[in-house]
Image (cartoon, rainbow, N blue to C red):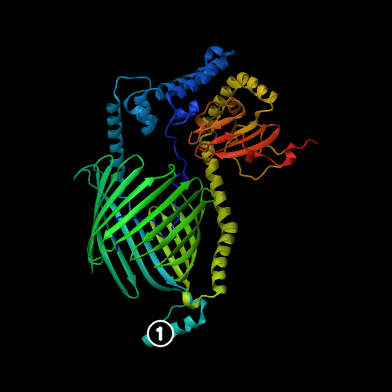
Amino acid sequence: RRVTPGVTMEDGDFPRDDDDDDEPKARAGRDFYAALNVKRDASEDDIKRAYRRLAQVAHPDKQASPALREAAARDFNRLNEAYEVLTDKDRRRIYDVYGEAGLAAGLEVGHRHKTIAEISEEFERARAKEAQQRMEAKLNFRGSYGFSFSAAHLVDAEIAQRRRYVAYKRGAKLSSGLDLNGMDFNSVFDVPLASVLDDRATGYVGAQGQMSRGMGAGGLILGMRVAASEHTGWELAAVLGSNQSAATLATTRQLSEHTAGNLTYSYSDAQGGLGLAVGLERALFDEHTKGSLNWNVGPTSGMSTGVSRTKGRNSWKFDLSVGPASTGIAGFFARRWSKKTSFRFGFRAGTTAIDVDFGGTRRVGSDSAVGMSVSVGIRGVHLKLRFNHSGQRFSFPVLISPYQRLTPAIVMCALAVPWTIVAAVDRYLVSPAVAKKEATAKAKLRERHRERVKAAKTDAAEAAEMLRRDTEKRTEKERSVNGLVVEEAVFGNFPERGVPRRGEPIVSGWGSGGDDDAWVDVTTALRFQVFDSSLDVIEGLDKAGMLGFCDPCPGEEKFLRVRYRYRGAMCEVTVGENDALALPNRSHLLPDEWNNSD
């Protein structure tokens, strides 16, 4: 068994979206790129052009009333602050890595008496101290625990009869429920070594064990991880077992901006002595796609390669392995249907396994998730239940029927019955309870931020009023050429819906402008960004930081919905808080009923 210092993804697990949290996250600081609406890799000339365009409108001297001059002064200072940081190479580099907190660690924005090395050193020192305090506060327990059951005797009468006969021969008592076929566990916790060796070193201690058919084995896990440099790390681990021991020494290094390599030496009696494996991982077409190539040099040789991609709600992976121990293909496709629910389809076909796996997972808290899947293959039909909580993973595979006893009826029931039960329980018990809990938490959250949101909405409204005169001229010009005209736009938290009926408001309550709404009208702010019948909002920007926007619902998931006309046709689109927006687009067209005059 390979030395496993931590918890790794196994077949049937579901990828976790680390950006999805039930608890609201504090903002890391203002998004200077969003303030100027420029890409994160924008050139200095791009930043200057964007600043000049916004500064001409937001300058206090261009405002007629004292109230608008005050609002303009506030927004103008924010634009200046963003411009100063992004046009200063040193401070921009700090901001890109550490955010606004990095700038504050060494100097206030606008002061230049410290070098980037001094600022980085102070920030790293403060961050290391915080990390050490967090490490000492908890030991970071993590582990995986598997319990394998059999329910075949409850499904197949012949298997039940054979089970009774074997029990009779052995003089054993039978349970009326599931049979426990085996179990395994792997659990470790970190040990801070800053006071002993170096603050870059972390040790861990744990145990692993397996039991099947009355026989078992186990071992003590000891290991240490060290970040040798910014680009290099190594890890030493050993398992001291009751019947066999093993050890590994692994090193990883960032070879280039897009490529990382690893080298692993191993020893165990089971593999027949020393082993060596090398691997490469590289970003392929973009940051969302990765490829890997691994070569197990010996003692049992083999090679594998794979590609994976994760973007938005979808993720997939495909692997190919060739060698005397195992040859075949494997992969999965997963889709996140909502913030808490995911679906997964996996498959394996090779010399060691042929099966398909259908499953889903649902988060039930900030640190917990439950999952279920059904696999069908040469090992039979299995129902797999999972529960994850705070780094601890529990799995319960249940054998429904061995391969030799499979019938179409068993397969259909295994695929349909569990999901029918889950759907019923979710619809009538879980979802109502969760919705009630979420509504209560959301109400408390909004009440806590009420005054802050009210002030932010006032600032956004004043910014929109400041932009109005310039925007009206631009909008009339677009109407005259039958170009792109933003009719309505809203940003915040509002219910999802399908294609709207003709005359249906963009969101419920549109036009009321109440302080309790979890959204804000950003029509003027988006009209201001229309140029030559096109509008582009860049992916990854914090839209709440854009001129004329605000955060109307801190800690909640936010969307931007835009209803617009282009060439006389009505269109509508809804995108996520960090998604890109490009108008016009034919896919945004509303049904003909919206565009047919009475």
Observer able to see residue 74: no
Q: Mark 1 = which residue?
A: 166
Count of numbered tags: 1
**Front residue (pair 324, 199):** 324
Residue 152 visible to the viewer: yes
Q: Is residue 53 above or below residue 498?
A: above
In the rendered view, tell whether residue 362 sits above or below residue 111: below
Identity of the residue furthest to the bottom in this view:
169
Residue 117's image quarter?
Answer: top left
Looking at the rendered structure, the kind of residue marked 1 is Val
Give the percent coordinates (x, y) of residue 278.
Answer: 29, 53
Residue 479 appears at what percent x and percent y?
69, 25
Quick one: quadrant of the N terminus? bottom left
Quarter containing the C terminus:
top right
Describe residue 19's horizontal placement relative to residue 120 as left or right: right
Secondary element type, mark 1: helix
